[in-house]
Structures are given as structure tokens and as C-alpha cells.
Amino acid sequence: MRTALWALVALLGCDRGHPREGTPTPSTPLPPATATAPATACSITPIPLRYPAPKRLVAIGDLHGDLAATRAALRTAGAIDDKDTWIGGELVVVQTGDVLDRGDDEQAIFDLLFSLEAQAKAAGGAVLLLIGNHELMNAAGDFRYVTRGGAHDFGDRRVAALAPGGVYAKKIAMHNVIAIVGDTVFAHGGVIGEFATQVDEVNRGARCWLDGQAGGPDAQPPVVASEDSPVWTRAAGMPTGDCAALAASLKTLGVKRMVVGHTVQESGINAICDDTVWRIDVGLAKLYGGPIEVLELTSDAAPKVLRGMRI
């Protein structure tokens, strides 16, 4: 199984020759602004879109298979101690997707985050994990960005574990693509255009597919493939951003700011559009070698960048 999967990875190729760019594209792009159709036959357990504003919230960007960087980010946030135990109390942590690909520790990161979800809930806090494009790519059988070590993950059963209905796909399906916490919307790539009016459909479509209730790897919902979707758009991540379109989305969603990952920021965490859009993918994974930075949002102060050290 290891040899066969790694051969598949090598055949499909990857972008590791461009470590600071890392711009995968949907394998079967649909026309722009095509939203996700409702999964009417799906019986997946609903989860909230909106959460009340906590006293303190920390957002963490793309992790890409680097467990040490994940731990460093969580410690910088004040979420865990050196034994991976939750110490955040009522802290809310939002991780904006892309746990998978480009690193060797993917399963270990998911297992840690799933454990912290339960620990945080018991303490009155929360860990909100979002779905990124790389989670959906793996479910679709797109392994272009799997490392040699990652190909051995998930008990040598990566394909079965991450395909729709697989053990880890079903765990990922217990999370949304888009979440709104207080006055802030979070998504991997951002929410723009018609997708701002169909956030429930986006969340449910991706979740039902991952759960195995909406077809196999070839039955990708538009949120996987559309270049404007909340996991693929770079409207919020490029140097200037499409501020007019992003402002329209914020108005539609009834929030004051948006927080996104997906596009590596050479300058670290930064904001555009009069500080209404924050970009938190700093390339903290080993492949990129970026800084350990997380974004802190509190009820009584402006957003703040917290900086940590690699473990």
C-alpha cells in the first residue's frame, strides 16, 4: 500500500518546487460563483453557523502537516501546556483549515485537535476547526501535495480514511467550511459573491459529501471545485484584495470583519480593507519556514498579532 500510494503521489506531481507560492487549483473547476446545491437527502447532524462572541478568541491559519508548529501556535495562543493539555479555559480557538498536505504529521495533528475539542468544551471554551481546500482535495482523491511521510499516514489507508464516508472524512465532516463568531466570519479562503448568501448550503454540501451521503470522490460539490468558493477564492488573500466585493459580503453576513487563511502572507499576519479583512496564513509549516503567529481577538481591544517560538 505504501509503495502504491507514493507512486500515485509521484505521478500526480506537486508544487514543492515553489515553496513560497503553493497555489494548487481545483482539479475540475466550475464556472465562477456557482454555489452549492442543497443536499436534500442528507441526514447529517446540524452544527451551528453562528457562535456568541467570547471574551477572547485566537485564530490559527494553515498547519500543513507540521505538528511541532501546531503545538507552538497553540502554546502561543495560551491554549495548551507542554503536555498538550488544554489550559485555555473559556478561550475559543478557530483553525481555518488545511491541516492536510505538505507535511508528515497530518494524522497526529487531527488527533490532537479532536482531543482538544473535547477538552476545551469541558472547560467552557471551544476549538472550532474549519474545512480547507486540501481536506476536500484529499477526499476527492487529489494527492498532488502529499509528502512521502504523509503517504504513510492514516495507518497506510489514506485513500480509505479520507474518501467520502471514510473514518477521518466523517470526523472532518463534523465541522463547517464557514463559521461566524461574534462579529467575525471565518473561512479558509474567504466568503465572496453569491456564496455570502448561501453559507448554510456551502457548509451542508461539503459536510454531507465528506460524510459519505452525497456520492464518492467523483461527486464533488461545487464548493470543492468552484474557483470562487470559500475554500478556493483568493479575493481576500492577494496583496490588495477585492475590498468592494469583500465589503459587500460583510454587509450580507452582518459582520464587521473576515479572517482567512489559504494564501501565504510573506509579511506575516496582516489586514487590508481598513482592517476589516485579516489574513493569517503565515506559512508556519516546516515546508514554508514562516513565523509562528496567531491572531488574537478580544471583546475590548483591537485585533492583535501574537508571536511565538518554534518548538
Image (cartoon, rainbow, N blue to C red):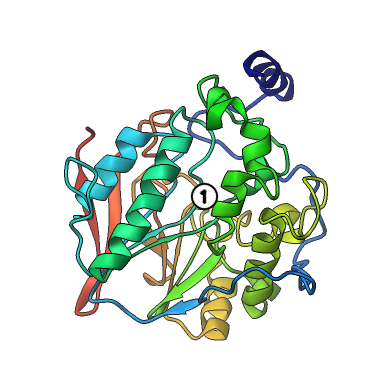
In percent of width and height, residue 36 lies at 75, 68
> Label 1, on which residue?
262
In the picture, measured across the screen, residue 35 lies left or right of residue 252, that is right
- Frontmost residue, 191 versus 97: 97
- Frontmost residue, 67 versus 287: 67
- Circle 1 Cα neighbour tier, 10 Å, few/some/many (<14 / 14–19 / ≥20): many
- Frontmost residue, 152 versus 27: 152
In the picture, measured across the screen, residue 289 lies left or right of residue 4, that is left
What residue lies at 41% left-to-right and 40% top-to-bottom?
A: 109
In the picture, measured across the screen, residue 13 lies left or right of residue 187, that is right
In the picture, measured across the screen, residue 244 lies left or right of residue 284, that is right
Find the residue positioned furthest to the top: 3
In the image, residue 237 sits, relative to residue 138, either above or below, namely below
For numbered disc 1, what is the local secondary structure?
loop
Q: Is residue 254 visible?
A: yes
What residue lies at 68% left-to-right and 44% top-to-bottom?
A: 139
Q: Quadrant of the N terminus?
A: top right
In percent of width and height, residue 228 lies at 69, 60
Q: Quadrant of the C terminus?
A: top left
